[in-house]
Image (cartoon, helix red, strand yellow):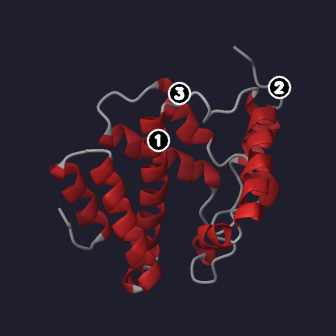
Amino acid sequence: MTVPRDLDAIFRAGRTRRWHANAEMVDTCDFTDGHGGRVARLICALVPEPSAALLKAALAHDDGEQLVGDVPGDFKAANPGFARQLEDIERRERLRLWGVCPILPLSERERQLLKLCDRLDALMWVAWHRPALLARWDWQRDRGDVVAMAGALDLGPEVIQAIVRVIGGEVSR
């Protein structure tokens, strides 16, 4: 096991501000350490016995953002070359902080669970802080994506119903 050398840098990585590029959410004061903790909690709620690797990845998956910030997903989608460069920078930073990249040892299913809970946390944050935004087309799209991801992971109708209760919308199953 590689022992982290720079505990101060790891602490600072958790203090990266989320939503700083989103004019409607910038004042909600979310940080990557709180986000990572909530993602880990969601994983524990949705998966009976999550692996330690999955929980570690949940806690540290955004630590590389301390170098580049929380770049909006729509911007990354519109600029795939730039998005690949950002991911490379973030991956190297996670490697520097942790000695290993916390996401790499995950199975494909675990990566999809991490992605689901990452997106679900964003929706839940918006639902808590700016519920009216969930009526907008982009958040409607994201809600549909989350429900589809849960269905693809075969989490079961009761889990999907619980997700829909929290973020609203319709179940298309």
Position above or below: 25 against 124: below
Q: What residue type is labelled 2?
A: Arg
Q: Seen in the image, is 90 located left or right of residue 112?
A: right
The crowding category of the residue bearing disc 3, from other C-alpha atoms within 10 Å (few below 14, some 14 to 19, many at least 20), is some
The residue sitting at 61% across, 44% down in the picture is 61
Identify the mark nearer the N-term, 1 or 2: 2
The crowding category of the residue bearing disc 1, from other C-alpha atoms within 10 Å (few below 14, some 14 to 19, many at least 20), is many
Position above or below: 16 against 171: above
Q: Seen in the image, is 151 located left or right of residue 98?
A: left
Position above or below: 116 against 140: above
The span from disc 1 to disc 2 (Cα, nearest Å) is 24 Å
Q: Answer with the quarter of the image where residue 2 lies.
A: top right
Q: Which residue in the structure is indicated by mark 1?
A: 40
Q: Answer with the quarter of the image where residue 41 lies.
A: top left
The span from disc 1 to disc 3 (Cα, nearest Å) is 11 Å
The crowding category of the residue bearing disc 2, from other C-alpha atoms within 10 Å (few below 14, some 14 to 19, many at least 20), is few
Q: Position of residue 140 (x, y in %)?
A: 38, 77
Q: Which residue in the structure is indicated by mark 2?
A: 5
Are dots 1 and 2 in contact, CB under 8 Å? Answer: no
Q: In which quarter of the image is the C terminus?
A: bottom left
Identify the mark nearer the N-term, 1 or 3: 1
Q: Answer with the quarter of the image where residue 84 lies.
A: bottom right
Of circles 3 and 2, which is in front?
3
The residue sitting at 74% across, 42% down in the picture is 91
The span from disc 3 to disc 2 (Cα, nearest Å) is 20 Å
Q: Which residue in the structure is indicated by mark 3?
A: 53
Foreground pick, 29 / 144: 144
Of circles 1 and 3, which is in front?
3
The residue sitting at 26% across, 74% down in the picture is 169
Q: Position of residue 129 (x, y in %)?
A: 46, 74
Farthest residue toward the top?
1
